[in-house]
Image (cartoon, rainbow, N blue to C red):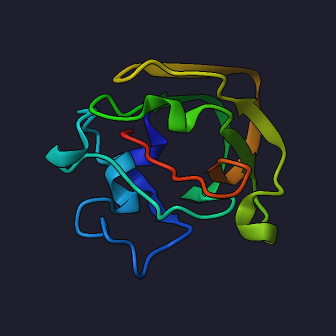
Amino acid sequence: RNLALHGKATQSDLVGNPWSADGHASNAIDGNRDPHYDHGSCTATEWQTDPWWRLDLLDEYVVTSITITNRKDCCPERLDGAEIHIGSSLLSDGNSNPLAGKISSIPGGGSVTFDLKKGISGRYINVVIPGSNRLLTLCE
């Protein structure tokens, strides 16, 4: 079952984002995989160092898979190199939790599922793009 639909999402910048009217963190857990940003179903951070998005599952679960949908209408390469972390710590905004996977590339509008064979226990799922002058957009 999709635990994300019942969680709470946040991202590294909530104030001052010029796209904030459209790029809410919750757009990545609304069940809508429309990969076009201007349709209101994707997230967006500002250009910043180590931008992140976090899902709070509101309780600890054993996570067995994660599916990420990339933006199609622009710049799918922005997600290249993103890391997925799962755990129950909010140290470093949750980005220090164990690494569950790394996105090498997802085609524009495409989805990739990370199957975590043994499962990883945690309350928080983070997606972070390490590096400076990066922008994070997720469409589910």
Measured as percent of width and height from the top left, residue 15 is found at: 42, 81
Measured as percent of width and height from the top left, residue 25 is found at: 40, 60
Q: Residue furthest left?
A: 39
Nearer to me, 7 or 83: 83
| Residue that appears at 55% across and 36% down | 79
Measured as percent of width and height from the top left, residue 134 is found at: 59, 53
Q: Is residue 99 visible?
A: yes
Rendered position, 124 above or below 113: below
| Residue that appears at 34% across and 23% down | 109
Nearer to me, 76 or 1: 76
Q: Residue furthest front?
A: 133
Q: In which quarter of the image is residue 140?
A: top left
Left or right of 20, for residue 9? right
Quarter that holds the N terminus:
top left
Rendered position, 138 above or below 114: below
Rendered position, 17 above or below 102: below
Left or right of 104, for residue 20? left
Left or right of 122, for residue 96? right
Nearer to me, 83 or 79: 79
Q: Can residue 69 be seen in this view?
A: no
Report the number of numbered marks: 0
Rendered position, 18 above or below 111: below
| Residue that appears at 70% across and 40% down | 83
| Residue that appears at 72% across and 30% down | 102
